[in-house]
Amino acid sequence: MNFLKNLFGGSGSSSGDKNTHYVYVQPKMCQEIIKVRIDTARELSRTDDYSGYWVRKMVSATRCPFQAEVTLYFDEKRHLQSEDITNGSFKTQAEYEMYVGDDNVTSS
């Protein structure tokens, strides 16, 4: 059972994990804010010039037809250097927590 929790990001992964980076994304024309987890130990690819790492994620909201494309760039030590987004916007952790805590999540 613990194997499945670790495999699918169960209680074994905490936000304090040094190999985890979170971004909060709101796809265009959507109210939903999605918490996106990046495992910096396993998901990053080397840049073409070997000066760092990068990752690209497609983010979909449950009740929204649009996808946001997120690209993150990291240095050699896997620290975030820059982030780009297409068809959406980045949100703060506080905005995400306020959205999640809101009982009035609208349904279409």
Image: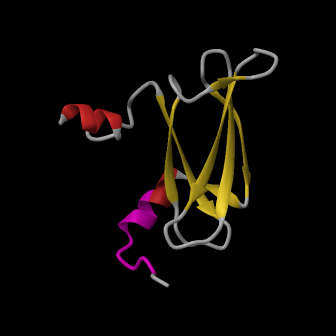
The residue at the point 82 percent across, 17 percent down is: 49
Position of 50 compared to 14: left or right? Answer: right
Residue 13 x, y percent position in the rendering: 33, 35
Q: Which residue lies furthest to the bottom in this view?
A: 108
Q: Residue furthest right?
A: 49
Picture residue at 66% right of the left edge, 15% below the top: 76
The foreground one among 47 and 1 is: 1
The reply to whether residue 12 is in sight is: no
Q: Is residue 18 above or below residue 94?
A: above
Q: In this view, does 82 lie to the left or right of 43?
A: right
Span shown in magenta: 97-106
Residue ID at (49%, 67%): 62
Q: Image point 26% across, 38% down: which residue?
A: 5
Residue 89 occupies quadrant? bottom right
Does 73 sit above or below residue 84?
above
Asked whether residue 99 is drawn in magenta, I would say yes
**Which residue is more in the foreground, 95 or 42?**
42
Give 38 or 4, whichever is nearer the viewer: 4
> Based on the displayed image, in which of its 4 quarters is residue 75 positioned?
top right
Res. 9 in view: yes
Tell me: residue 85, above or below residue 30.
above
Q: In this view, does 51 lie to the left or right of 90?
A: right
Q: Is residue 100 above or below residue 70?
A: below
